[in-house]
Image: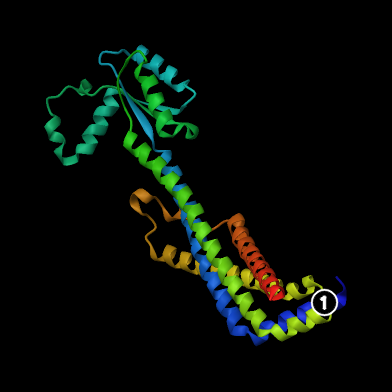
Amino acid sequence: MTRAQIGFIARRVRMSLSELLWTHVLTAGTMAMTLFVFGAFMLLQGNLETLLKGWGEQIQINAYVEKGAGNAATLELYKRLQNMPEVQKVRLISHEQAWKDFHAALGAQAGILEGLPADVLPASFEISVRPEYRDAVKVAQLAGQIKKEKGIATVEYPQEWVDRLQLIVTAVQWTKWILGGVLFGAALFIVGSTVKLALLARKDEVEIMQLVGAAEEMIQAPFVLEGMIQGVIGAILGLGLLWFLFSFLRDGMPKSMGLLGSLDAVQFLDINGIALILAIGWTLGWLGSLISVRRFLHTWHSN
């Protein structure tokens, strides 16, 4: 492409942006809202996955030692559990520690424990599971394996919690793709409609270019470039709006959210997420305008 052709395309884009300013502003704004919604979902998904990962780290199996097991047998059992490949960490809670924890949990009502022997509560193990084994099937298999160990009386683990955790992760993954597909389709339609309006407004100019033998790429280039500019501007506006909303909500919420953890763990989109939003805006603008202008010119030629 020659310098003269590049200059011509640049002038046509500048004139179009000036003559159809509000049309382009409306399209960029609509694109911004579309990418804002998609970016908000990305932000929600990223922080939700971080939250779920933190919850997943709390999944543990409680294994209770048989009553009467000596210290030597308990320590040997501790070593066997610690050596299991699925186990990340094992914490031994002795009779004495279990009694102290139970006494502290009762608080002012601890008086009801008077008269009970200190060893009424069995020793137990709190077993943390490695991340790669934190799904429902593998946790159940590990619990069954631990229950078969000599010296273990009973095993408890939050099966319902594990199942729901897995269900939430799966739902988030599916919703991401479904919502993304709907938003991308809507954005393509919006850009395509704007290009059709621009083509109709410059119909005489396009006809003259065709009569003098201008290449189809020269006719398409200004419209495609306009679509890309709209997409990038829309992405930037969407990211700015998303950052404003994120900062407003984060500053207006308490630093600690109980079971949800600290707000320090809540983060904005990383550099890869920002780059993805910009790339999506550029791609949707380019693809939507290219498809629309080619279809419009093809229909024009056939008529």
Q: Name the side, left or right, on which 202 lies relative to 104.
A: right
Q: Mark 1: give few (<14), some (14-19) or many (20+) Cα within 10 Å.
A: few
Q: Which residue shows up at 58% across the image and 79% down it? A: 25
Give residue 49's position: percent from left, percent from top. Answer: 47, 48
Q: Which residue ends up furthest to the front in the rendered image?
A: 303
Up/down of 153 relative to 276, above or below: above
Give residue 66's position: percent from left, percent from top. Answer: 28, 16
Q: Which amino acid, mark 1?
A: Ala
Total numbered labels: 1
Q: Nearer the viewer, residue 106 or 39?
A: 39
Q: Which residue shows up at 86% across the image and 78% down it? A: 4
**Mark 1 sits on what residue?**
214
Residue 298: quadrant of the picture: bottom right
Up/down of 147 relative to 197, above or below: above
Q: Which residue shows up at 62% across the image and 63% down it? A: 278
Q: Which residue shows up at 30% across the image and 13% down it? A: 69
Is residue 204 shown to the viewer in this render? Answer: yes
Up/down of 46 relative to 281, above or below: above
Q: Name the side, left or right, on which 208 lies relative to 76.
A: right
Picture quarter with the C terminus:
bottom right
**Element under disc 1:** loop
Q: Nearer the viewer, residue 96 or 20?
A: 20
Residue 123: quadrant of the picture: top left
